[in-house]
Amino acid sequence: MLKLFISSLFLLWTFLSIGQTPPMVECATVAKSSWVKKLQSINNNYSTTKKTSQVVPIPIQIHLIVKVNGISNLTISQIRNELDSVNHFYSNANMFFYECSSPEIIYDDSLYNYEYNTEESILLSQHYTNDVINVYFANTASVNGTVVCGYSQFPPSDDYAVIGSACATNGSTLAHELGHYFGLFHTHGDISQGELVDGSNCGSDGDLICDTPADPVLNSGNVNTSCVYTGTAVDANFMTYTPDVTNIMSYSRKVCRNSFSAEQYFVINNVMQTERSNLYCQSVTAINNYNKNIINLFPNPGTEEITLLLSNPEYQTEFTLYNTLGVCVYSVTFSGNSLRINTSELATGVYFYTTKSDAISLTGKWIKSE
Ligand SMILES: [Zn+2]
């Protein structure tokens, strides 16, 4: 199990050997060497290919593993809060995660403290919904007996991630694992960890992404509680690292992780459109007729007017537009296929919208330009 996992075990061993409490192993997502070439080819188009201009809804299925008697360290409400945090981080990739169906509660004492080796096949054969991102929340998630924060899979793969409860509400682990699912390596690099501080090999080493600085493998020992890097490591040219302690794909303190870089957003959006284009909500129960086209808002960015298109005209839809302070600047309830909204009076800038239709609620970002 791969370089990453071995290095994680080494880290664990290091802590044990110097008598400290072992840290939770961050992440057990296994780097795929086959993904390197693909990621490089995506990055080669970085300056020329555009992101999708519309917000793309991404269907998720929450699976919460609880004991047979119902005991759990996590609630659905906590998980939904975490999903809000994910949506905040992914809005710049023009993506919005939503629940395709009601959460599945898995009552199973043996899966409650989940072990990858023996139990992944059970999750994927008995508790898996095709073509949505299945996110399994266990009390603990282990790989070879070592407790980890979580893991996912690089593309191409089945659509899932596993998260342990200790890392399920920290605001960044779910976003991090979904980052792997959408093709991002750790900023310190998974296949090779020799990215130079001067950026000269940024396209072939480290995370292969050039707008994330070289990262000497961050951890709670070299990032302080004020989210300042305190390490003194140097690269092969004896240059001191200036890593980004806020990057979600790093091993920085979890409370410090709150950003993706522009190129990371580009990769996420590209992988969503290519490798993950199967994602589609097929549920006919909780979300009747819901599909990727339920809302189409254009133009975005826009100026004088925006148009909303809805795929299902039968539902009453409530549309609300907020400014970045969270103040409602426009609200309307309507039914039908489309609605045109005059936005000429609004100041230029970023807005967030919500649409509520039947039981469905979606949010997205809209930009008013000059
Ligand atoms: Zn990771």
Image (spheres, grey):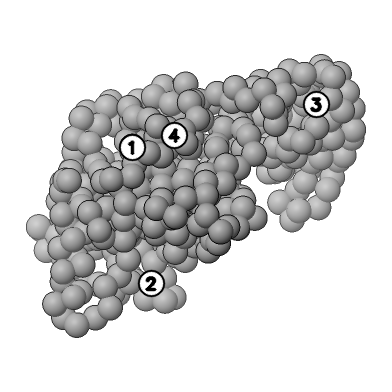
Query: Going from the N terminus, do you reach mark 2 or mark 1 first?
Result: 1
Q: Is residue 270 left or right of residue 188?
A: right
* Rendering coords of residue 244 (x, y %): 36, 59
The foreground one among 45 and 135 is 135
The foreground one among 121 and 205 is 121
Callout 1: helix, strand or loop? helix
Q: In the drawing, what numbered circle is on residue 305? A: 3
Amino acid bearing label 3: Glu
Callout 3: helix, strand or loop? strand
The nearer-to-camera label among 1 and 3 is 1
Amino acid bearing label 2: Val
The nearer-to-camera label among 2 and 3 is 2
Query: Going from the N terminus, do you reach mark 2 or mark 4 first?
Result: 4
| Residue at (27, 53) in percent of width and height | 143
* Rendering coords of residue 325 (x, y %): 74, 56
- 330 w.r.t. 227: above or below: above
Q: In the drawing, what numbered circle is on residue 121? A: 1
The nearer-to-camera label among 2 and 1 is 1
The single residue placed furthest to the front in the displayed view is: 69
Q: Is mark 1 within 8 Å of ligand 1?
A: no
Q: Which residue is mark 2?
A: 228
Amino acid bearing label 1: Ser
Q: Residues within 10 Å of mark 4 (few under 14, many from 20)?
A: few
The foreground one among 10 and 287 is 287
Callout 2: helix, strand or loop? loop
